[in-house]
Image (tube, rainbow, N blue to C red):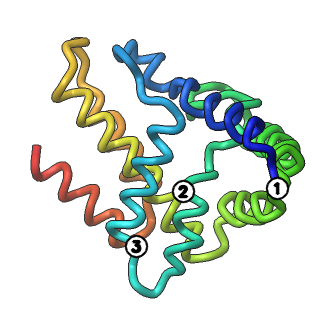
Amino acid sequence: MATIKKFMKISGQMKNLQRSGWVYHKIENPESDAAHSWSLSLLVQLYAPAELDLCKCLKMANIHDLAEIYVGDFTPGSGIAPEKKHEMETDAMRRLVKELDYPELAELFAEFEEQKTPEAVFVRNMDKLDAVIQARYYDETQTYGGRLFEEFYNYAEEKITHPQVLSLLRELKKQA
């Protein structure tokens, strides 16, 4: 089991790591990786279909971006090849498995990345939805002069494959 001091360090890094997409868009007080993971976990808890393993979904939601404390947060426009990003994040997860003494971390991350289980697909789709929700929130609460919702909505609509998540995405747009 990890020492509490090691947990404190890793948890603190997640809380302090700002999401690079929001920094790029010059958002005031941008969301942290920890805040994003919490929001995603709450979405998963609220909307996970009964046939999915909710515990596994929540674990994936909590750890899906943990590697970013060592490799950074890459946006789709970062110019990093998906294979390179995967390699870097897998190496970071191996490091975290040792530091936290948490072997299940590697299994959960691999399952999320491979997208071969219904739980992994659902959580990845909800991850896309969460970004759209956050963009909408910024559009409604900040005075940066931009409109992020449409950009993030259009991107997510192309990527989301889960029917329930797609329905939630479209519901969000209708409530504009």
Cα gap from disc 3 to disc 2, whole angstroms: 12 Å
| Residue receiving disc 1 | 1
Q: Examine the image and state in which quarter residue 44 appears.
A: bottom left
Which amino acid is tagged 2? Ala
Which amino acid is tagged 1? Met
Q: Name the residue located 26 percent from the left edge and 66 percent from the top edge.
A: 167
Q: In this view, does 150 lie to the left or right of 114?
A: left
Element under label 1?
loop
Of residues 38 and 75, the one nearer the viewer is: 38
Instruction: Please tell me how crowded label 1 is: few (under 14), some (14-19), or many (20+) other residues with Cα within 10 Å.
Output: few
| Residue receiving disc 2 | 61
Disc assigned to residue 74: none
| Residue receiving disc 3 | 48
Which amino acid is tagged 3? Ala
Mark 3 touching mark 2, by CB under 8 A? Answer: no
Q: Is residue 73 visible?
A: no
Q: In this view, does 42 lie to the left or right of 169?
A: right
Cα gap from disc 1 to disc 2, whole angstroms: 21 Å
Of residues 175 and 54, the one nearer the viewer is: 54
Mark 1 touching mark 2, by CB under 8 A? Answer: no
Q: Which of marks 3 and 2 is nearer the N terminus?
A: 3
